[in-house]
Image (cartoon, rainbow, N blue to C red):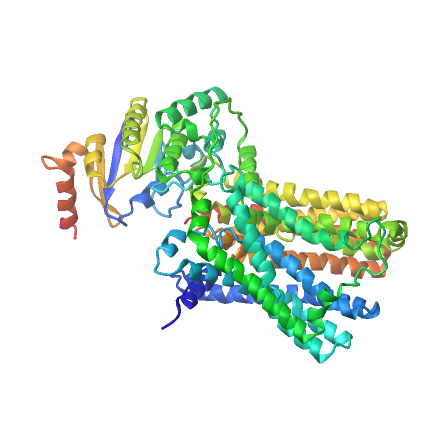
Amino acid sequence: MKSKLAVLLRMQFLGSFGINKMLHSKKKGALAGLGFSAAGIVLLFALVEALICLYAWMAAQLAAGAMMQGAYFPVVFLLVALVTFALTVANVNGKVFGFRDYEMTVSLPVSTAQLASAKILFVYLENLAVSACILLPFWIFGGAMMPFSLETHLCVLLVLFFVPLLPSALAVFVGALLAVVTARMKRKELVQTIFFILVIVAACLLPVLTSGTGDGTAIESPLELPAWLRAPFEKFWAACVFAAASAAVFSLPCVFIGKNFARLNTMILTRKSSSAYKKKELKTSGKVRALFRKEIKALFSCPEYSINALSGTIIAVLVPVILIVTVRGEFSDLRAAVFANSALIAPYFTAFMLFSSLTPTTYCSISLEGKSLWILRSAPLDGGQVLLSKMLVHLAAETLPGVLVAAVFGGVLGFGFFYVLSSVLCVAAMSAALGGFALLLNLRFPVLEWEKISVPVKQSRSCLFSMLVSFVGLGLVLLIGALCASVNAWLGAVMMPIFCFACLFLSLGLLSACGRKLYDRLLR
Amino acid sequence: MEEGDIYGFIGHNGAGKSTTLKAVCGVLAFEEGEIFIDGHSVKKEPVFCKEITAYIPDNPDLYPHLTGVQYLNFICDIFGVGKKERNERIERYADLFELTPNLSDIISSYSHGMKQKLAIIGAFSHEPKLLVMDEPFVGLDPKAAFSVKELLRERCAAGGAVFYSTHVLEVAEKLCNKIAIVKGGRLVADGETKSVVGNESLEETFLELYENEK
C-alpha cells in the first residue's frame, strides 16, 4: 500500500503541469499536442541551458583567470540560492496555502503534518530541479577550467542536493507571513506583487551593493569570502554539517506549518477585506480605455503573472544600473571604451534591452480571461478592440520601459546618437512585434478552463511558444547586428532596425488577418 | 419572442438550454440557422445585437481583481451608459439588492449570491431590450429573488423581453407568459404557458413530455 505522503505528492505532480488533463482529454489531437508541447519544452530548455552554459563558461574563465578558485562554488551556489528564494517566495501562496482544493484536501483522513510536508517537499523538488539546471553547467565548466580536488567535487555533489532546502524553508516562512499580514488588505495582490518585485530587485542588487567597502570604494578582491562560507566546498565534513543543518532548518516549516496548517489557511482564505463604500460620481470613459484599465489592473493584481511578464523589464532596467554602480570610478574609461567600440557592442546592448519583452504581457492575457470571457463575448465589443487593449498594455508595460532604458542608458554608456537611435528603433519595433506574436499564440492556444492561475501563466503552450519566439527573435537581432557590424560599422545599426520592422509588419499583418478570426473562434 | 414576453426555457440537464442562450447573446458561435434580435442578425450584426442584450450566466464568473463598483463602471463604459444614468441606476439597483455596502470590496471576496446580484445589477444598468438569463435565481436569497422577478416584470412593461432558463417549474409557471420545453437540442413544446400546460401543472406536463419523447 502506498504511503499517504507519496499519494499526495503524486497528485501534486499530476496536477502541476496539466499532463493528466492532456492525457485524458477527449479533444482530437490531444496526444499530438502533448508531443508538440514536449518538443517545445525540450527546445526551450536547450536554449535556456545553452545560455546558462555560456554564462558558466564566462564565469569559470573569469574565476580561473583571476585565481579565484576558492570563491567560485560558494558565490555560484549563493547566487542560485538567492534566485531560488526570490522565485519561490512569490509562489508559496496558492501552492502551500490558499490553494483551490484546500477544503477537499483538508477533509481527507490525512494529518495536516503530512499535507504540509507534501506541499513543502514539492516546493523543494521544484527548486532542486531549477538549481540543478543552473548549477550543473557551472560545475562542469568550473571543473574543466580549474584544478578542483576530488573532495571538492564530492562536496559540490552533496551541497547540490541540500542547497535548495534553506531558501525553500525561508520562502515558505516569508510567504506565509506575507499571506497572513496581507489577508485583510483590500489590495493584497498589489501589495504582494510590489513585495515580490522588491525581493527580486534586492536579490539582483545585493551581491553588487555588498561588494564595496564602507567608504564607497570598491575593495581589491570582492570574492575573498569568509572561511565558513568556503568550508562546505572544501571539506567533506563541513559539507555534511551544512547538509544536516539545512535539513534541520527545512524541517522547521514542515513542523510549524503542519501544526498550524488549518489555522493559517483559515486566516488566509476567510479573512476578507472590507471598506465602506462611499457613493461618488462615477467617471465615464471610452470602450478601449475601459478595457485598457481592466487589463492593467489584471496585470498588477496577479503576482505570478506580473512577475513572469515584468521580470525581463526589471532585469533590463537593473543590469545597466548594476554595471554603472560596479564600475564607479572607472566609468569614464568604460564610456570611452563603449564609444570607441559602439559598432560591435551595440548589437549586444540592443539584444539585451529586448530582455524587457522576453515574456510579453500578451502571452496569456486571453487565457487569463478564463471563465470570465463571457463578459467580453456578450458585450458590444469588436474583437479588434479587445485585442488592441491587450496590445496597448504590452506597449505600456514592456515596450515603453525598454525604449526609455535603451535611450537613457545608450546615451549614458556612451553610444553615439546613431547607435542609440538604432537601438531605440529596434527595441520599439521588435518588442511590439513580440507582443503581437505572443497574442496570436495565446489566441491559437488558449487555456480558458483553469482553476490555478499558474496553469495559463506558467504551464501553457502559449507561454512556452511565446518564450521560444522571443528567444529566437532576440537571437536573430543579435546575429544580424553582429554579422553586419563585423563587415561595416554602420551596416549593423541599419540592418537591425530593418529586420525588427519587418518582424513588426509580419506580426501586425498576421494579427489583423487571423487575430479576429481566432478571437471569434474562442468558446466555439 | 415579442416585446413584453417573459419566455421560460425548460429542459433536463444537457438538453441544450445554456448553449442556446449563449448562442443568442453571441457568447457562442453557431454554424447553422439564424438568430434575430429586434430584426438584426446575431451573425451579421453581432455588436448591434449585443448593445441591446444583456446576458447573465448560471455561474457568474466576474473579474475577481476588480471591486464591485469598478466592475459596474466597466460595464457602463462598454455599453456607453451616461454619467447621470449610471449613477442613478447603480445606486438604485445596489440599494435594492442590498449590495451597496460591499461595492468597494474586491469581487474575489464575494459569495456566489453576491456575485450573482452584481451580475444582475450590471445587466440592468444598461437597460437592455432583451435579457438572457441562465438559471437566474440560483444562489439568490428569497428577497433578492423576489426583487429580480419584479424587475423582470418592470423591464417587460417598459417594452423589453426576457428569455431565461430554469429548473424551478413552479416559478416558471407563475412568471412566464410563454414557455418552451427542450430535449436533446430540439424543441418538444412551446407557446403560451396556458396552452402548453392546459389543465395540468407545468411539472406534470414536463414529465409527461419527457417520458413520451424517450
- Report x, y in % for residue A398: 65, 45
Q: Nearer the viewer, residue B77 or A209?
A: A209
Q: In this rendering, would A95 be left or right of B121?
A: right
In percent of the image, x 22 and y 36: which residue is there? Answer: B179
- Report x, y in % for residue A137: 68, 70
Outermost residue, bottom direction? Answer: A150
Q: In this rendering, would A353 be left or right of A181?
A: right
Q: Nearer the viewer, residue A244 or A346?
A: A244
Looking at the image, residue B173 lies above or below residue A201: above
Tally the marks. Answer: 0
Q: Is residue A203 visible?
A: yes
- Report x, y in % for residue A90: 57, 51
Q: In this rendering, would A292 be left or right of A143?
A: left
Looking at the image, residue A81 lies above or below residue B41: below
In percent of the image, x 51 and y 53: which residue is there? Answer: A454
In percent of the image, x 54 and y 30: which residue is there? Answer: A286
Outermost residue, left direction? Answer: B199
Q: Nearer the viewer, residue B132 or A94?
A: A94
Q: In this rendering, would A427 be left or right of B28?
A: right
Quadrant where the image shows the N terminus of chain A: bottom left
Looking at the image, residue A95 lies above or below residue B104: below
Q: Is residue A298 visible?
A: no
- Report x, y in % for residue B86: 45, 24
Q: Nearer the viewer, residue B213 or A197?
A: A197
